[in-house]
Amino acid sequence: MLQGTVRRLAALMLVTLALTGCAHSPTYDPSDPLERINRPIFTFNQKADQYVLRPVAVGYTKVLPATARKGVSNFFDNLFYPTTIINDLLQAKFKQTGKDTLRFILNTTIGLAGFIDVATGQGLPLNNEDLGQTFGRWGVGQGWYLMLPLLGPTTNRDLVGTVGDNWTEILQYTDNVTWPERIALKGVEVVDDRSKLLGPDNLINEQLDPYVFFRTAYLERRRALVYDGNPPAEDMDFDDEEEEDATAVPADEPAATVPTASPAPAP
């Protein structure tokens, strides 16, 4: 009797330890086989943001009024807009190519190098295209999810695209801009981009697993960009058919014998 009780207690302890281990183990998402490496890098990036980038971004918002920050954002949007135009063309979006080219010309000239966005008011909205999206449009898979030190999230496809997009930037072909000046411009751009994300900070901090939340948000956003906001429902029809087959009641079998689907486990 006593030995049986001891065995049951020992078994219960082993199960508890196993469940505890599972609770703290990687999520094993198929798109993230390097999660054991990505997680520590994510933690490092979060600390770097907490102690360096975020304080600088907060100071940036306090020093510059909203109107000035908007002008800075407009300038960077326009400065790197040729990348969007070239990828419009590579994606065979010829009508959008013409509109985006006109937008760039208007904002560069009338908009004073892009500080003033005059094109949006003329029916020429800001678009976002890059080589990673171009690869995705023509069927290239996203590959693995990657977390890069200081640079943040990407995928195999987007990383190659980022390297390629480097050659579509105007600064690559401007001799009057030195490397220190390019680095300074990039630094201001990073701080400006970070200042736009100060609001969602609390949302990320409230997540049970910020890493998974961040990964899901990034991958879903990139997928939406590839499909211009209308991503297809992957395997939806197939899944629906399987579900209907699993729950259908055969004509010669009573409904009571049909098993019900168990709820999906919480993440």
Image (spheres, grey):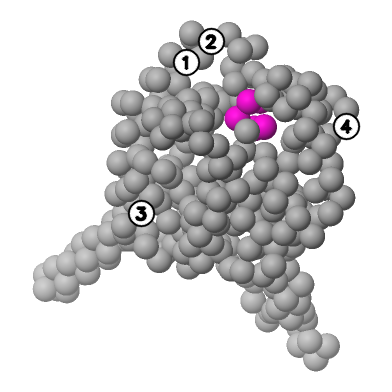
**Which residue does the image show at 69% across and 25% down from the upper left?**
114
Q: Which residues are magenta?
A: 74-78
The residue pinned by badge 4 equals: 123
**Which residue does the image show at 76% across and 24% down from the upper left?**
109
Q: Residues within 10 Å of mark 1 (few under 14, many from 20)?
A: some
Q: Earlier in the sequence, mark 4 or mark 1?
A: 1
The residue pinned by badge 3 equals: 38
Q: CA distance from mark 4 to mark 1?
A: 31 Å
Q: Nearer the viewer, residue 9 or 78?
A: 78
**In the picture provided, is 100 more to the left or to the right than 191?**
right
Q: CA distance from mark 1 to mark 3?
A: 29 Å
The residue pinned by badge 1 equals: 60
Q: Is residue 239 above or below residue 173?
A: below
Q: Please tell me whether mark 4 or mark 3 is closer to you in this view.
A: 4
Three-letter amino acid code at the position of disc 2 = Leu
Q: Residues within 10 Å of mark 4 (few under 14, many from 20)?
A: few
Q: CA distance from mark 4 to mark 3?
A: 41 Å
- Which numbered tag is attached to residue 176? none
Q: Is residue 119 magenta?
A: no
Describe the element under mark 3 as helix, strand or loop: helix
Q: Are the residues tagged 4 and 2 within 8 Å (C-beta)? A: no
